[in-house]
Image (cartoon, grey):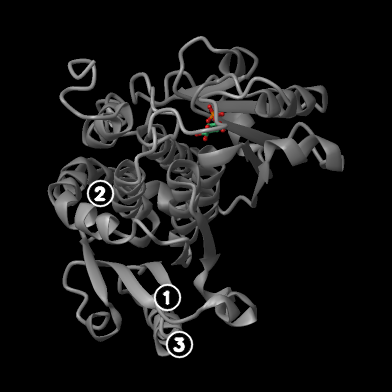
């Protein structure tokens, strides 16, 4: 009923709008009096954490993209090498695992069969398994050595939204916690990053307040048969997630690419009028921003319609954006928390105007309990 959906038409839309709260709840109570990070359900000793020499993240679907973002954050803050692998591929390639490998399983439901089988395999190889999960007492956390629960509340829409954002939060917390225990220089920046994370819920509110712009944009695309998404760095998994949402909900052919890879193939797909959603990284010292802009120029020169998500104050993007969606200013590693939201709104609205059932997309299940 409408009441269950807080007046929204779909659970998915309700859940998109719950994200500020979900993110805030997932950050709550993570610090001790002295300001140190404290992850209650961690159950891994400091010695065990110091022994970790490799992290393998396994997940499926949207959770896999959270894992891709996590790789950027964990490697940057902890200097531990991270691999990210689809759960369904992991076990069958005879992965190299031992007691010093930490396997991180990300699963909203905690019941995905591929992910469960992957952690069972990891444990037979003596690896420690940490679950990032939104469902208390579900199978994956029960069979893991440690768990970080996300506090998104029940997610009903089949396509994950608040589940994804809170998985990102859990991954950042894990990265910072390991940095703190290992004493890398980023361990001293816990305060700063936590303050940036704590500002995110309000920044997501700002994005949500601009929903109408996205809805109008979606309405213009009812007859679109193909959409591309471009991103770089932590924006690359955001592009993949944006494309996945469109496939899942609007049944439109959509693909995400790493912007730097365009010239190695995908640019051949560009033809006049093709919509390309571009996740523009924040301006910084690392040239990511400039390189993204040159990629956008390339596709625009070939007639693509560029729909750019770029931070407030970024004027350099203006000449190359056919449509400009503003994002709050956040550091590049945290940008997925704000940049994903317009893409969720876009897919939800486009599917709605196309007349599809957003909460129950065809052929999909909320939790896939067969391999
Ligand atoms: C299904 C859902 C996706 C979800 C994936 C992984 O395919 O339709 O939305 O991302 O499973 O689910 P999990 O519960 O393991 O995160």
Q: In whole angstroms, how far apart are the C-alphas of marks 1 and 3? A: 22 Å
Residue beneath disc 1: 288
- Looking at the picture, does residue 7 appear above or below residue 329? above
Q: Which residue is mark 3?
A: 302
Question: Image quadrant of residue 7?
Answer: top left
Question: Can you identify the residue that label 2 sits on?
Answer: 196
First in sequence, mark 2 or 3: give its number: 2
Whether residue 182 is visible here, answered yes or no, is no
Q: Secondary structure at mark 2?
A: helix
Residue 118 on image: x %, y %: 73, 29
Residue 111 visible in the picture: yes
Q: Is mark 2 within 8 Å of ligand 1?
A: no
Residue shown at the point (51%, 9%) measured from the top left: 137
- Within 10 Å of disc 1 (Cα), the crowding (few <14, some 14-19, many 20+) is some
Where's the C terminus, which quadrant? top right
Residue 345: x and y in percent read: 29, 46
Q: Secondary structure at mark 1?
A: helix
Q: Is residue 359 left or right of residue 35?
A: right
Disc 2 from disc 1: Cα separation:
21 Å
């Amino acid at each position: 009923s409408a009441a269950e959906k807080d007046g929204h038409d779909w659970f998915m839309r309700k859940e998109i709008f719950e994200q500020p709260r979900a993110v805030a709840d997932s950050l709550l109570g993570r610090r001790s009096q002295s300001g140190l990070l404290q992850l209650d359900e961690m159950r891994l000793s400091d010695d065990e954490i110091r022994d970790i020499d490799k992290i393998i993240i396994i997940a499926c679907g949207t959770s896999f993209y959270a894992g891709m973002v996590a790789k950027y954050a964990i490697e940057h803050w902890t200097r531990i090498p991270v691999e990210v692998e689809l759960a369904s591929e992991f076990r069958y390639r005879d992965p190299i695992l031992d007691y010093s490998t930490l396997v991180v399983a990300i699963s909203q439901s905690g019941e995905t069969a591929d992910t469960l089988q992957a952690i069972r395999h990891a444990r037979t190889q003596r690896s420690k398994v940490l679950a990032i999960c939104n469902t208390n007492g579900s199978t994956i956390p029960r069979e893991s050595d440690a768990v970080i629960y996300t506090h998104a509340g029940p997610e009903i829409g089949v396509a994950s939204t608040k589940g994804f954002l809170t998985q990102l939060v859990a991954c950042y917390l894990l990265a910072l916690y390991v940095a703190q225990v290992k004493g890398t220089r980023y361990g001293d920046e816990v305060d700063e990053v936590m303050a940036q994370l704590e500002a995110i819920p309000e920044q997501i509110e700002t994005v949500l307040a601009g929903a109408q712009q996205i809805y109008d944009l979606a309405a213009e695309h009812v007859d679109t048969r193909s959409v591309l998404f471009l991103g770089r760095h932590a924006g690359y998994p955001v592009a993949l997630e944006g494309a996945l949402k469109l496939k899942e909900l609007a049944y439109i052919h959509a693909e995400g690419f790493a912007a730097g890879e365009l010239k190695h193939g995908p640019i051949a797909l560009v033809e006049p009028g093709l919509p390309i959603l571009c996740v523009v990284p924040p301006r910084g010292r690392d040239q990511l921003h400039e390189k993204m802009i040159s990629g956008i120029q390339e596709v625009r020169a070939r007639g693509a319609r560029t729909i750019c998500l770029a931070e407030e104050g970024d004027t350099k993007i203006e000449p190359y954006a056919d449509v400009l969606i503003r994002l709050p200013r956040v550091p590049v590693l945290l940008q997925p928390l704000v940049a994903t939201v317009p893409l969720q709104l876009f897919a939800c609205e486009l599917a709605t105007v196309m007349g599809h059932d957003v909460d129950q997309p065809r052929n999909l299940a909320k939790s896939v309990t067969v391999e």
